[in-house]
Image (cartoon, helix red, strand yellow):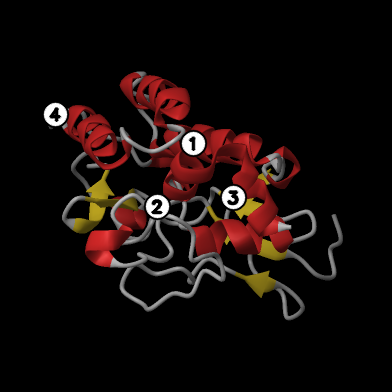
Amino acid sequence: MSSESRQIFPLFLFPPLSYIKALCAATDPLIDTGEYFVKQSFRNRYEICGPNGREVLIVPLSKGKNEKMPLQQVQVSYAEKWVQQHTGALKTAYANTPFYAYYGPEINAMLQAEPASLCDLSREALAWCLEELGFSDKCTHFTEVYTEAGPADTDHRKAFSPKAERISGIGPYPQLFSARHGFTGDLSILDLLFHEGRAARLRFL
């Protein structure tokens, strides 16, 4: 990895397409797991499209000042039945897509394993997504401590905000509820995988 110019990414859970596109375009990207947790970000949420349109699925965290903790120390809370909610929402949204029968059980098993650490859950989720896309090489370099961005670096850690308008550069592609809602852009990579399977890789080349 070059020390002169790096592309530094946050670690997201089932990231939006704009993140995946930027990550796949990067040469030897660095994923920072040592940064402080950022509230209301894709670090513990992802977006899908169901019968009622865009839907946000949030992983609740254990009580505490999570925004003042390194991501590696942030713990997932299972006091709420969020795993059941997420798997149910994914089934409602994607059961009739071409690849739900293939991917659904794997995603359900990942969530039902109930890893204690948000970092562990997100690393597994990101690695799985990239493996299905054929880009496993983009998920090999992680930093365990916060990495300062140098003047030549591209720092993506403040990009891809759920609150900001985002353009993924992916799509439009056929979506199950497009007749009702039109094309819904920059959803979680799960949306594209459920609709196109491994052929989704071609959209990132």
Which of pointers 1 and 3 indicates the residue nearer the eye? 1
Residue 165 place in picture, x, y as percent:
38, 78
Which residue is labeled 1 in the image? Answer: 125
Mark 4 and mark 2 lie on one chain; the one further toward the N terminus is 2
Q: Is residue 186 above or below residue 55?
A: below
Q: Nearer the viewer, residue 203 or 139?
A: 203
N-terminal-most mark, 1 or 3: 1
Give the CA separation, mark 4 to mark 2. 19 Å
Depth check, mark 2 against mark 3: the one in front is 2
Question: Image check: 187 left or right of 141?
Answer: left
Q: Are marks 4 and 3 in contact (CB under 8 Å)?
A: no
Question: Which labelled disc corresponds to residue 43?
Answer: 2
Instruction: Tell me the kind of residue under disc 3.
Output: Val
- Label 4: how many Cα within 10 Å (few below 14, some 14–19, many 20+): few
Percent across and percent down for residue 28 are: 78, 54
Q: Residue furthest front?
A: 179
**Side of 11 where 64 appears, left or right:** left
Q: Distance between the residues labelled 1 and 2?
A: 12 Å
